[in-house]
Image (cartoon, grey):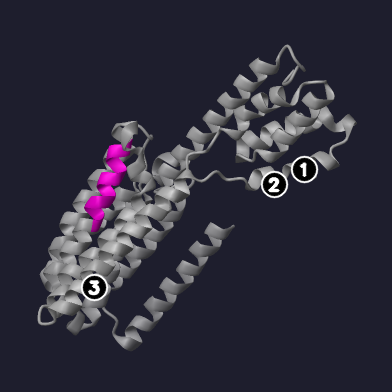
């Protein structure tokens, strides 16, 4: 219903634009009509996974047509658009390629290719804009996208580079701050070397402390789940044991929540006469498990890939746990 409502609204808007065109002498109506058709196509394409992947290219064409309509009706805007007109569509298609999703096996290469092309065409586009320091800003834009491409491709090539994906947000933020400072701000401080040196060291210290805090955070153990265990154990009734085990297993596999599973296993084993050190050995299967964290600047396919990977690892933890407990309390039977 939402899609049908959107199409109806777009239809009303295009009819109003056509009706008002004669009054206000709006040019480029053929582009508006084409954009309307593309919008309908965009909504229809979502109904099938094969066509849905191509929707970013429809958006790219629509944005290009919108710029054409604006440039036709605003001559001053056309002056800015003219030198970059040949680059706009390749740049938009490059961005669409970044959003183009294929099976995960090929996705890193496709996304990386889109990022590199976007960096190249983006630099060319910004460089040709008629304002000061356009080349420097274009260079910053290209550096950030290439850095994003590196942190996308290398972790997919080999697991030893997985840390690059986790550090992506920090690396890109640092690159942005450092690039803006050294390319745009630092040249303005050449006549004040004392202040320039202070700012240089301030940036170095800021990067160092931020990096060290990330390392410390990665070494900390999250105990928030363990705090919930006592409350869960108090509420658990004997007749709910089997149901609670299955529910806790599902909660752990689907959402990665450990506390219900640790609590119910502890209560079952202690009730069965297991010693504390034996119970500790059993629940260590769960406590020692840590999900792979999803980066803040993750692509949709990366998020889904990591979520699938985490779920598979949780299932493996449950299988190992069931095998260990099979002869003890019949866990999972």
Q: Which mark is residue 199?
A: 3
Are the residues flagged by discs 1 and 3 in contact, CB closer than 8 Å? no
Real-space Cα distance between discs 2 and 3? 44 Å
Q: Which mark is residue 230?
A: 1
* Quarter holding residue 244: top right
Real-space Cα distance between discs 1 and 3? 51 Å
Work out which quarter of the rendered image holds the C terminus and state it. top right
Determine the residue positioned at 28% across, 40% down: 153
Real-space Cα distance between discs 1 and 2? 7 Å
Determine the residue positioned at 70% across, 22% down: 278
Q: Which residue is mark 2?
A: 227
Would you say residue 273 sits in the magenta stretch?
A: no
Of callouts 1 and 3, which one flags the residue occurring earlier in the amino acid sequence? 3
Magenta segment, prevailing SS (helix, strand or loop): helix
Would you say residue 150 sits in the magenta stretch?
A: yes
Point out residue 201 in the picture as x, y percentages from the top left corner: 24, 67
Q: Is residue 44 above or below residue 290?
A: below
Of callouts 2 and 3, which one flags the residue occurring earlier in the amino acid sequence? 3
Of 333 and 211, which appears nearest the observer? 211
Q: Give the magenta range.
A: 144-155
Q: Residues within 10 Å of mark 2 (few under 14, many from 20)?
A: few
Q: Is residue 200 above or below residue 111?
A: below
Are the residues flagged by discs 2 and 3 in contact, CB closer than 8 Å? no
Q: Residues within 10 Å of mark 3 (few under 14, many from 20)?
A: some
Of 276 and 301, which appears nearest the observer? 276
Point out residue 318 in the picture as x, y percentages from the top left corner: 62, 25
Determine the residue positioned at 64% across, 36% down: 252
Of 9 and 295, which appears nearest the observer? 295
Q: Which mark is residue 160?
A: none
Give the secondary structure at mark 1: helix
């Amino acid at each position: 219903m939402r899609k049908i409502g959107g199409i109806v609204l777009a239809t009303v808007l295009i009819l109003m634009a056509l009706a008002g065109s004669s009054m206000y002498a709006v040019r480029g109506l053929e582009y508006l009509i084409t954009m309307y058709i593309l919008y309908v196509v965009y909504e229809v394409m979502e109904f099938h996974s094969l066509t849905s992947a191509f929707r970013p290219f429809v958006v790219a064409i629509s944005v290009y047509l919108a710029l054409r309509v604006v440039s036709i009706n605003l001559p001053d805007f056309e002056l800015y658009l003219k030198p970059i007109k040949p680059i706009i569509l390749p740049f938009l298609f490059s961005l669409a390629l970044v959003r183009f999703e294929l099976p995960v096996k090929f996705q890193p290469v496709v996304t990386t290719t889109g990022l590199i092309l976007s960096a190249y065409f983006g630099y060319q586009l910004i460089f040709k804009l008629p304002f000061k320091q356009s080349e420097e800003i274009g260079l910053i834009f290209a550096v950030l996208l290439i850095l994003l491409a590196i942190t996308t491709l290398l972790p997919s090539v080999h697991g030893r580079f997985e840390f690059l994906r986790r550090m992506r947000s920090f690396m890109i933020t640092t690159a942005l701050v450092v690039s803006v400072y050294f390319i745009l701000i630092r040249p303005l401080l050449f006549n004040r070397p004392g202040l320039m040196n202070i700012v240089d060291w301030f940036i170095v210290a800021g990067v160092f402390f931020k990096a060290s805090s990330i390392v410390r955070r990665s070494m900390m153990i999250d105990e928030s789940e363990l705090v919930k265990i006592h409350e869960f154990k108090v509420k658990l009734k004997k007749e709910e044991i089997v149901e609670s085990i299955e529910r806790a297993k599902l909660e752990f596999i689907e959402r990665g929540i450990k506390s219900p599973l640790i609590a119910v296993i502890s209560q079952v084993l202690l009730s069965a006469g297991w010693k504390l050190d034996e119970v500790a050995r059993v629940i260590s299967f769960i406590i020692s498990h840590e999900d792979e964290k999803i980066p803040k600047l993750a692509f949709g396919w990366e998020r889904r890939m990591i979520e699938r990977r985490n779920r598979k690892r949780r299932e493996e933890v449950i299988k190992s746990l069931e095998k260990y407990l099979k002869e003890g309390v019949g866990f999972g039977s």
